[in-house]
Image: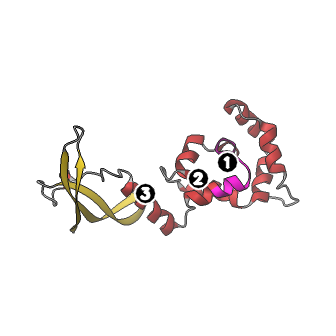
């Protein structure tokens, strides 16, 4: 069911005002094969039928609004880490995004997008990201694979000794 929640005016590319109705629509979708339900927001030109999905535009003032709310619902529903928690855990370890991505076996741009809430981590990445919450275990895992870490650092032009040194603070006698 479509619900009209507002009427807005926004300039087109020439600067001329265009009037829209802002609507909300309950929708079900699948993310990573998992179902979620969300109330999406769309803008519909004032002269168009609000029931015609062909007329729905992403919010002109915030085109990523629906994606961000989808990601938030998914993270809450499936207990995934929030972008801020990921960034905070990484920074607590003193790691740059590139260093953390190397140690986690992730693409740096994916980690940056996840932290900026522009991408949603798949389950496999969520498992890896949670390692950041346990510094001793994380450092131990990285320490057990120095050849791989050094090669990844070489390829990314990152100082391997610096990365390994940052994690050395968290080393313990625990075994994985």
Q: Nearer the viewer, mark 1 or mark 3?
A: 3
The disc at residue 129 is none
Q: Which residue is mark 2?
A: 125
Number of marks in the image? 3
**Disc 1 to disc 3, C-alpha distance:** 24 Å
Left or right, 3 with reference to 27: left
**Disc 1 to disc 2, C-alpha distance:** 9 Å
The disc at residue 104 is 1
**Residue 110 location, x and y as percent?**
55, 45
**Residue 62 location, x and y as percent?**
36, 52
Q: Nearer the viewer, mark 3 or mark 2?
A: 3
Left or right, 120 with reference to 25: right
Marks 1 & 2, CB-CB < 8 Å contact: yes
- Residue at 78%, 52% in the rendered image: 139
Q: Quadrant of the N terminus?
A: bottom left
Colouring used for the render = secondary structure
Marks 3 & 2, CB-CB < 8 Å contact: no
Q: Secondary structure at mark 1?
A: helix
Q: Which residue is mark 3?
A: 68
Marks 1 & 3, CB-CB < 8 Å contact: no
Residues shaded magenta: 88-99
Label 3 crowd bin: few (<14), some (14–19), many (20+), radius 10 Å? some
Q: Secondary structure at mark 3?
A: helix
Label 1 crowd bin: few (<14), some (14–19), many (20+), radius 10 Å? many
């Amino acid at each position: 069911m479509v619900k009209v929640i507002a009427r807005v005016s926004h300039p087109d590319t020439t600067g001329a005002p265009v009037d829209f109705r802002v609507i909300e629509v309950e929708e079900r979708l699948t993310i990573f094969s998992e179902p979620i339900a969300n109330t999406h927001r769309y803008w519909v030109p004032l002269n168009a039928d609000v029931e015609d999905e062909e007329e729905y535009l992403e919010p002109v003032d915030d085109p990523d609004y629906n994606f961000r709310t989808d990601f938030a619902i998914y993270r809450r529903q499936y207990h995934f880490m929030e972008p801020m928690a990921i960034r905070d855990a990484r920074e607590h370890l003193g790691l740059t995004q590139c260093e953390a991505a190397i140690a986690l076996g992730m693409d740096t741009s994916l980690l940056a997008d996840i932290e900026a809430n522009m991408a949603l981590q798949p389950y496999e990445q969520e498992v890896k990201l949670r390692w950041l919450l346990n510094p001793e275990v994380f450092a131990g895992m990285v320490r057990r694979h120095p050849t791989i870490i050094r090669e990844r650092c070489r390829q990314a032009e990152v100082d391997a000794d610096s990365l390994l040194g940052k994690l050395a603070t968290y080393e313990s006698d625990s075994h994985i």
